[in-house]
Image: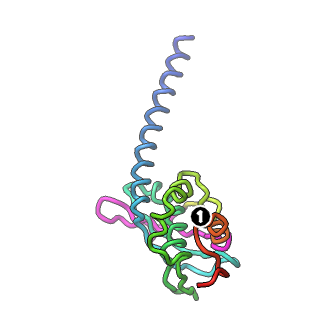
Amino acid sequence: MKTMGLKINLLLILLTGIYSSAFSQAQKKADNDTENWRYEVECVGTGNEGTYLIKVWSYSKKPLVAIEQAKKNAIHGIIFQGFQGGKNGCNGQKPLTSNPSLEQEKMDFFKDFFADGGKYMKFVNVTNDGSISPEDRLKVGKEYKIGVVVSVNKDALRKDLEAAGVIKGLSSGF
């Protein structure tokens, strides 16, 4: 009986190791995709006061990875790209910074900020509980283009970046 229990424990350890290794490889690929910042942002509607409601299109060979990376991509888009106006009464928004080299200048800050489970998570929420409608799951070559609707608390994000000295406050002048 002890031999059977030992075999089951060893099997569970082996399966856990295989799963962890596969997830780790997928996460590395996702992190590489994120470092290249391959995404698109579009306005979906108006959010609560101080928030943006946007759809982020992320690319990955694994749809679940693209869904998770969409949160990082959304925050990156708000800081560095902004987005165009769209349907549903959306107004386009400029990025929080107009400095094209800010990401390089503050590389250490952004590396920690965008780390898995990093501070960026405080400012973004997936609004559709991770469920993706069929029209938001597109096969493009060997990978997927996944659209995820998120809410970004841009006011809190701006305040945090200002407090950290990463971007200038609105009242600091030109």
On screen, residue 139 above or below 30:
below
Mark 1 highlights which residue? 126
Q: Residue at x 63, y 63 (%)?
A: 164
Residue 138 in the magenta stretch? The answer is yes
Q: Residue furthest right?
A: 49
The colour scheme used here is rainbow
Q: If the image is split into quadrants, where does the N terminus sit?
A: top right
The secondary element bearing badge 1 is classed as strand
Question: Residue at horizontal 61%, vertical 64%?
Answer: 124
Reply above or below: 134 against 89: above
Residue 2, percent from left and from top: 56, 11
Q: Quadrant of the C terminus?
A: bottom right
Q: Amino acid at mark 1?
A: Val
What number of labels is visible? 1
* Rendering coords of residue 173 (x, y %): 62, 84
Is 29 located above or below residue 71 in the figure?
above
Q: Is residue 160 left or right of residue 84?
A: right
Image quarter of residue 49: bottom right
Residue 90 percent coordinates (x, y): 57, 85
View extreme (left): residue:
141
- Where residue 158 appears, x then y in whole percent? 63, 71
70 drawn magenta? no
- Near-viewer residue (102 or 73): 102
- Dot 1 crowding, Cα within 10 Å, few <14, some 14–19, many 20+: some
Which stretch did the figure color magenta? 131-156
Asked whether 86 or 166 is in front, the reply is 166
The residue lying at 30 percent from left, 59 percent from top is 142
